[in-house]
Image (cartoon, rainbow, N blue to C red):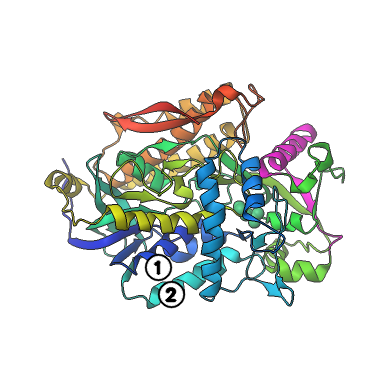
Amino acid sequence: MKKSDLISKSLSYDFLIIGTGLSGLSAALYAAKFGKVCIVTKSSIDESNSYWAQGGIAAAVDEDDSVESHFKDTISAGSDLNNLDAVKIMVSEGFERVSELIQNGMKFDSDESGFDLGIEGGHSKRRVLHALGNETGKAVVDFLAKEIEKNKNISILENTSVIELFSDNKTCFGGLVQCDKQKSKIAISAKATILATGGACGIYYNSTNPSSTSGDGIAMGINAGAYATDMEFVQFHPTVFFKDGSKNFLISEAIRGEGAILTNHSGKAFMENYSKNKELASRDIVSKAIFNEMKMNGEKNVFLSLKHLNPSLIKSRFKNTFELCLREGLDITKEDIPVAPAAHYILGGIRTDLFSRTNIANLYACGEVACSGAHGANRLASNSLLECLVFAKRAVDSALEFSRKNLSIPNKIKKRSNEISLISSEKKLERLLSFKVSISQVVNNYVGILRNKKDLLLALNEISSIKKKDLDENDIIDNRIMNLKTISYLIAKSALLREESRGCHMREDFSSKNSKWLKHINWKINNGTLRFSYTNH
Ligand code: SIN
C-alpha cells in the first residue's frame, strides 16, 4: 500500500456548507445568525451555476399576479411529477425570501412604474425579476458575497474540494477536504452539513454549465448513504450559442420573452407547428421542436432572430449577450444567432423532504444538488434561484431543530480518511481527463434530448468500461473517476428504466406519458453496489 498523507488539521463548526452558489451563500448568511459556519468551494464564488444564471428569479410580486398562478404554471411544466407541497412552499415562501432580499438592499431592475418584470417559457404572466439586465445570478451572488465577507461567523475555503463526507450511513459528522494551496487534508467536523454544490450537467459535452459542475455533491451524498432520485430528468436549454469551434454560452429565454423568434435554415419560423404558445412554450417543448427541425433538415443548429426588436432594448436589457455575440463577430441587432439545445439543469439529485433533510441525520441538501420534487419532470424557467432561497433557509431551520449536538468523528471514519492519498500518479490524472472527455461525449450522444433503448445501452456499455476493481478507493483521482462513473451511470440507467416520455425525459421508443410511471426511481448504495427502488408519486 502506498504511503498515505495524514490529516494535517482538524476544524470544528456548527455548519459545514458545501458550495457557494445561491443556496450555499444564502444558507451561510442565515446560519451565521446562530453559529459558526464554514463554506467550502472547489473553485471560487464566481464559478457556480447561480453566478451565471441570466433569466432571473420568478416570484409573484406584481399586483396582477398571484402565488396561485405561479403554482399552476409550475405544476403544468412539471408534467404531474411535482411534489405539490414542495411547489406550494416554493412559490409562497419564495415570495417572502425575495421580498427579504429586496428589503436588505438587493436591487432588481426597475423603472418609474415598478419592477421591470420579464417573461419566459411556461409562465402565464410577467413575473421574472432580473438585475443588471440579464446578469441576475452575478448580481445576487455578488450582493450576498459582500455580506458574507463582512460576517465574522463565516469562514470561506475556496479552491478546496470535499473528498468525502464523514458518514456511518446513518449520521453525517462533517467532511474531509483537500485544500489545493496547502495540498493538505483537513477534517471538518460539523453539527450540520449542508450540500449546496449545484448540479451535474457539466458532465455533458454540450452544456451551459462549467465542466466543474459534474455532480460531485450528488456522488458525495450517495457515497454517504443518501438516496438520489429522478436522475433521468435532465433539462436541455433550447437556445445555446452554437458555432463550430466557439465556446457555447446561454442565450437567455428572456430574449424570447421580449419577442425573439426561432427560425430554421430556410428562414421560416417553426414554433407555431409545435405549440400554441410558440416561442414561449415550456422548455421541453421548445427544445424538442428545435431538435426535430435540426434532424429534419440535417443541420446542427437553428437561429434566434432579434432583428425586428428595438436595438437599444437589446443593447441595454441583454448587454451581456450582445457583447458576447459581438466577440464572436455577430451583431445581433442585425444578424440572427445560431443556437442549439444543450444540457442545462438536472432535476434529480439527493432526495430531500420538505425540510431539506436527507435520509442521513445531520445531512441536508438544497438547490440543484437536491431533489425536493418542486420541479417535477421539467423545471419552469427562473424557478431555480427561487428554490435555492427557499430550501436553503429550510435546511438551516431543520439543522437548528435536529442537529444540536456536538458530534465527534468516529475513529473508524478517521482511520479511513487517513488512508486516502492526495498523491496520485500522472498516469491516473491522464486517465481522469480522458475519461471525462469520453464520458461527456457518451452522455451527449446517447443520453441526450431524445433517447432510445439502443443508445442508452450503448452509453451504459461505455460507462461500464471503467471497472471498480481497477480503481483504488484510497486514491483521490480514482475517487473522482468513480464519481463521474456513478453520475453518468445513474442518468443513463434511470433513463433506460423509465419507459415513457414525461417532461424533459423523452424516449423515441416510448413517446407518450404513461400513468404507470407516476413514480420515482430512487438509488442508494447497498453493500457497495448501487441499487434502485421505486416510490409511488
Ligand atoms: C435563461 O435565462 O434562459 C435560464 C433561466 C433558467 O434556467 O431558469
Horizontal side of residue 191 vs 272, given as left or right: left
Residue behind mark 1: 29
Give the CA separation, mark 1 to mark 2.
Answer: 8 Å
Horizontal side of residue 196 vs 115, given as left or right: left
Asked whether residue 207 is drawn in magenta, I would say no
Taking the spot 40% from the left edge, 68% from the top edge, the residue there is 29
**Along the line of sight, the residue nearer the viewer: 70 or 172:** 70
Rendered-image quadrant of the N terminus? top left
Residue 147's tag is 2
| Mark 2 crowd level (few <14, some 14–19, many ≥20, 10 Å Cα) | few
Q: Is residue 246 visible?
A: no
Question: What kind of residue is marked 2?
Answer: Glu
Residue stretch in magenta:
282-309
Secondary element at image label 1: helix
Q: Quadrant of residue 359?
A: top left
Query: Splitting the image into four quadrants, where does ligand 1 fall?
Result: bottom right
Residue 229 on image: x %, y %? 45, 36
With respect to residue 259, does 455 lie above or below? above
Q: Earlier in the sequence, mark 1 or mark 2?
A: 1
**Along the line of sight, the residue nearer the viewer: 356 or 65:** 65
Taking the spot 87% from the left edge, 42% from the top edge, the residue there is 266
With respect to residue 331, does 263 lie above or below? above
